Amino acid sequence: MSDYSFITKELIGSQKKCLRLANYLSATQLYLKENFLLEVELEKAHIKKRILGHWGTVPGLNFIYSNLNILIKRHNQEMMVVIGSGHGSPAILSNMFLDGTLGEFYPEYKVGKQGIGNLIRNFSWPGGFPSHASPKSPGIILEGGELGYSLATAYGAAFDNKELIVACIIGDGESETGTLSASWYSNKFLNPQKDGAVLPVLHINKHKISGPTIYGTMSDKELMNLFKGYGYEPIIVQEENIYEDSLKVFEYAFQKIKQIQKEFRGDNLDQDETAGGESSEKNLKENIEAFKQKPVWPVILLKSKKGWTGPKELDGTMVEDSFRSHGIPLEDPVEDEEQFKLLEEWLGSYKVHELLTEDFRPIEEIKGLLPEGELRPGMNKHANNLVSQPLKLPEIGDYELEISGSKKASSMTELSKYLRDVIKNNPNIFRIMSPDESESNKLQSLFDVTGRTYVWPVPGASENISRDGRMMELLSENVLQAWLQGYILTGRHGVYISYEAFMMIIASMVDQYSKFLKQAKSVGWRKPLPSMNFIITSTGWRQDHNGYSHQNPGFISSVLNDYSESIDVHFPPDANSLLLTCEEALKSRDKINIIITGKRELPQYITMENFKEQMRSGISIWEGVGNVKSVGTEEILENQKEDDIPDIVFAATGDYSTLESISAIKILKRLVPEMRTRFVSISELSCFGIGDRRGLNFNGDNLKRILTDSKPVIYSYHGYPQDIKSLIFGHSFAGRISIHGYSEKGTTTTPFDMQVQNDCDRFHLALEAVMKVSETNEKVREKRKQVEYYINSLLEKHAKVIIETGEDIEEIRNFEKYF
């Protein structure tokens, strides 16, 4: 299949020289602050005071880069490179410098003597490049600080990028993470017909920070069996004869990828686009036949010494080929004379002057191996987000629900209809991630136009399976998140839909992405990215059937703690508001949108026109819910009459919180009509000064006018009360707000009992209102004992009935009949 005649002694000789130069640049980035090319004898004054970074993985990365460059140039192949070991940044920067990529973005890093000096001095230096890969580096879509996400991110980048190959360099230490271990299953979701390809290169250098890696302890036979079991064709490159063997293996892997794509594409004829005729029918039959088989993609298992070409020993102890080379192999060359001599010998061993021309550019032998133009990995148009297209969104008004007295609807069911048409309008740039929860989360409408992505043959009873489906289902939240990151960071669009309780599984990943996004926005040449959108449903308030393990709103707290301008947290109270919120999220750029919504049928409250007004600030007084009048939310409320000033304000964030707050007001209207109430819907926490609306004429004074100057506020919140306490800290009204939220009380119980256990139900809210208002309103004070007795009797009845019958009391199941 493969022709290896291109592999000559001259090519290998040139590759070795290229590696010497890349390794020299990488090593000196760690150590030198001047005398960058050793033009004079090395002195301790030339060494950085703070030696920061990692060496162990770097030589192996440089070696893999050189093989990929040869492959790219030989075949003019568009290729992205995703590197899991982000601490190998010196290798990334060295290769981008040598092929001229860095100089394209930063003139101070143009190839030449001054550029070499800037590269070396500015690594892990204030104002320079950090110790790990970062968005400041072109071609980078993964920082690789928190390990485990490289392979799934690479697959995400390859989805729907038909001509792209994504080379993914995976560390054997990284491979021990749960996310990476599950990521190997991504090959079963990659459609050879319409997706690109991923070439995993597992770099086995046998050691982590202070111990052996698991793969480093496995025999070749065990490694082969493992990856064959995953469904790959593993090819091992041993340390002996590594240069020639690697050139053969990388070429073979490339040809294998092309062979698979040819077989499954039917000579580049898409099955869905077949247009009749004998030739077309023949290709179609071959194409269908190919899909009865399992595509077996190659994976390269490359073994090399950790810290290869670095110091062999220190004080009689192994450094090269041991864990001691993981970080800085010579930690104190300024104070330790032996270390200084070893450093001098190490850097001198590369003979850098043999590798540069008189004007300090790579010699022709090296330059001839490097890709040019857009084929350079750092110039890849997908990695640098140069091909992103906006979504073609359906007309949102077509999905509006009419608001009538007792109308109920499932917000997720209505959203499913909208997302169905988003998929229909954008068949190649939009995907939905969902960990085996699409049916549970009311997304059935999606299956009108798409299916669950899966390429391998499936059991006969399987439903809604499609090799080109837009629904990505895998029971690994981490892998789904990495897929989404790879997809979005290459310019496409997506939504992640999941149970609320299990979003904490990816909280750290979202935090890492938030950091990437924050840094990327400060890089002038980086273009705005499609936003990352999460729809969190199956919330804790209706996990009464699954119980305590499924009740956890902690993800909301986690993202709020980031206090990032890139994160917006939305709580649409009904279907119309959810539809508008989703539309806004899909239109936005450079955001992380968190949308929390229930999936059960609930009352519908607000028209799209009215909610559009509320979306301007994330907060609004709802007229007609309370029993006092008020002027518009953004107008000054100074000219109100006494009767228009409420005794108490109910505020709510979240659909179930809204239901209970409005129900509490209804109870009070019946039992204590003399109490003046106002209801305030807070649908976006940005109104407290976070997210992208913090500068929108909505300050503490405006909040104070909505929540009144002095009246008590009972705030029913979807998540942990501490979220709101942190957000309102320092506001003048903070002391008069009583916050009800989830307080870690739950079990398998009735829907309403979940509210009761956490003191978030309508009865407890009404009781508190009576208690607070009776202090200032004499008419309410006169009825206080009577009202308290009645409501407490309902709570006692509730506690008894749910145990006897397993159902909520009649006064809840038929609430409108009683209140």
Image (cartoon, grey):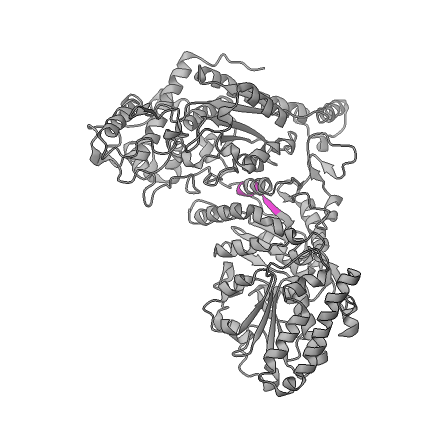
Q: Which quarter of the rendered picture does the N terminus lie within?
A: top right
Q: Residue at x 72, y 60 (%)?
A: 751
Q: Residue at x 73, y 32 (%)?
A: 458
Residue 380: x and y, percent?
49, 35
Residue 488 magenta: yes
Residue 126: x and y, percent?
32, 45
Q: Is residue 44 left or right of residue 484?
A: left
Q: Is residue 276 left or right of residue 231?
A: right
Q: Which residues are magenta?
A: 487-495
Q: Which picture quadrant has residue 49?
A: top left
Q: Which picture quadrant has residue 493?
A: top right
Q: Up-down: is 590 above or below 148?
A: below
Q: Which picture quadrant has residue 163?
A: top right
> As rendered, which of 681 and 329 lies closer to the eye?
329
> As rendered, which of 119 and 438 lies closer to the eye?
438
Residue 759 magenta: no
Q: Which quarter of the rendered picture does the C terminus lie within?
A: bottom right
Using the rendered image of the protein, determine whether residue 573 is visible from the camera's viewpoint: no
Q: Up-down: is 278 above or below 126?
A: above
